[in-house]
Image (cartoon, rainbow, N blue to C red):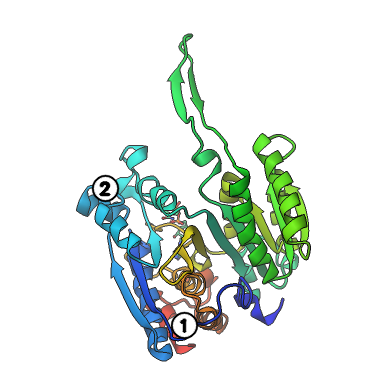
Amino acid sequence: MEDNACLPLGPAAWQPVRFPMPTLKFAVLAGDYIGPEVMTEALRVLEHVAQQENLTLSYTKADVGGAGIDNHGKALPDSTLKLCEQSDAILFGSVGGPKWEKLPPKEQPERAALLPLRKHFTLFANIRPGLLYRELTDASPLKTERIPDGIDIVCIRELTGGVYFGLPKTTTTLADGDVQSIDTMVYKKSEIERILQVAITTARARKKKLCSVDKANVLETSVLWRKTVTEYCAKHAPDLALSHMYVDNAAMQLARDPNQFDVFVTENMFGDILSDEMAVICGSLGMLSSASLGAGKNSLGLPFGLYEPAGGTAPDIAGKGIANPCAQILSVALMLRFSFGLDAIAKRIETAVRSAVTGGTRTGDIAFGKPSVGTRAMADAIIANL
Ligand code: NAD
């Protein structure tokens, strides 16, 4: 694995550093349980970097998820949505937990906050790096001999189409008394081309290898997906090595030999499942970040995006000061890269996280019997490496 394995999207994939440095105007939605704990540390790291790099930060915190329900009566309060609309990016923690589990499904924090945010800002491209450092291969349930150098792949998931949003979506009682539910899977060619552009940019910045995952042997939407990907890449990205794989095979291949992929692109539901499998083989959820990019541009002319850790609110460890803040800190790096064009500074953060962890400072989820540190000390070690 190359030295730059901590740079999941490779160098110069997006906008280079711009002068003068922009003001970083973003909304901070920490959410519930460990959300605020790891967010505090991520902001501390960012404040430190901002001071070193002469960046001006202008961020505002707002309630979301369970905190939104408790303080404003709904998971995505109007004031929070307005703040996001006035920002150039959203730094998100995670939402939900036992306190709100008895609410009707439509009012649950995740469904009533995250899905509307994705829809409202047309956050159609979910970029999820699957990165496991060589030094942390013990964290993976895969045998070390299968991943001697760790894992370094990227999942690009379409996030606003497919069966999660397609209509009709109904449950009805039939004439014979049976009950029937319908979900509808819909994709337009333009939606496929849009996510493909993100996948192509990402693949070009890495090994120029792109795998498109579908179920074209069964689903109409997948037939269109495969045809569109084949034609679009032939015309616009002949420099990439393009392959296609059925989703059931992709699930198996990820567990067998994950590094055979470099970048893979897929539709919403397949991406949901495969990206979670990817998170498992990469060890702790506490290490994995993600970016969801919007169709719209922010005031800097760069993609508006929502940046969040791959994991949830971890109620089992909340309040103990032991959550791993790395995923949230790496989400800050993704925000700097995509929404603020600060690739070099993003790399500095990614390198500092890697150095701190491989240097031996580890939270409990990645310690494997060795001495572990708490959330704050982990962030301190990252700051020391900046
Ligand atoms: P989870 O990701 O919160 O936790 C799964 C396991 O991973 C737990 O053992 C937890 O301790 C561990 N873990 C997760 N993040 C960690 C970190 N930073 N450091 C150390 N360990 C960490 O998943 P869950 O338990 O299924 O869900 C808990 C709640 O989070 C649920 O209400 C769920 O709906 C919500 N959730 C929210 C999001 C989101 O906001 N995007 C995503 C997933 C789950």
Which numbered mark, 2 or 1, is in the foreground of this view? 2
Q: Position of residue 239 (x, y in %)?
A: 78, 65
Q: Secondary structure at mark 1?
A: helix
In the figure, is residue 235 to the left or right of 42? right
For the residues labelled 2 and 1, the Cα–Cα distance comes to 36 Å
- Is residue 5 depicted above or below 271 in this figure? below
Tell me the amino acid under the disc marked 1. Ile
Q: Position of residue 226 (x, y in %)?
A: 72, 45
Q: Is residue 206 visible?
A: yes
**Front residue of this view, candidates 113 and 376:** 113
In the figure, is residue 255 to the left or right of 330? right
Numbered mark located on residue 382 in the image: 1
Numbered mark located on residue 74 in the image: 2
Q: Residue at x 74, y 64 (%)?
A: 209
Q: Secondary structure at mark 2?
A: loop
Tell me the amino acid under the disc marked 2. Lys
Q: Position of residue 144 (x, y in %)?
A: 70, 67
- Choose the circle earlier in sequence order: 2 or 1: 2
Asked if ligand 1 lies within 8 A of label 2, the reply is no
Q: Quadrant of residue 59?
A: bottom left
Q: Is residue 318 visible?
A: no
Point out the quarter of the image occupied by ligand 1: bottom left
Q: Position of residue 355 (x, y in %)?
A: 55, 83
Q: Residue at x 32, y 53 (%)?
A: 65
In the figure, is residue 7 to the left or right of 217? left
**Marks 2 and 1 in Cβ contact (< 8 Å):** no
Badge 1: residue crowd in 10 Å (few <14, some 14–19, many ≥20): many
Q: Residue at x 27, y 52 (%)?
A: 77
> In the image as oriented, which residue stretches furthest toward the top?
176
Q: Quadrant of the N terminus?
A: bottom right
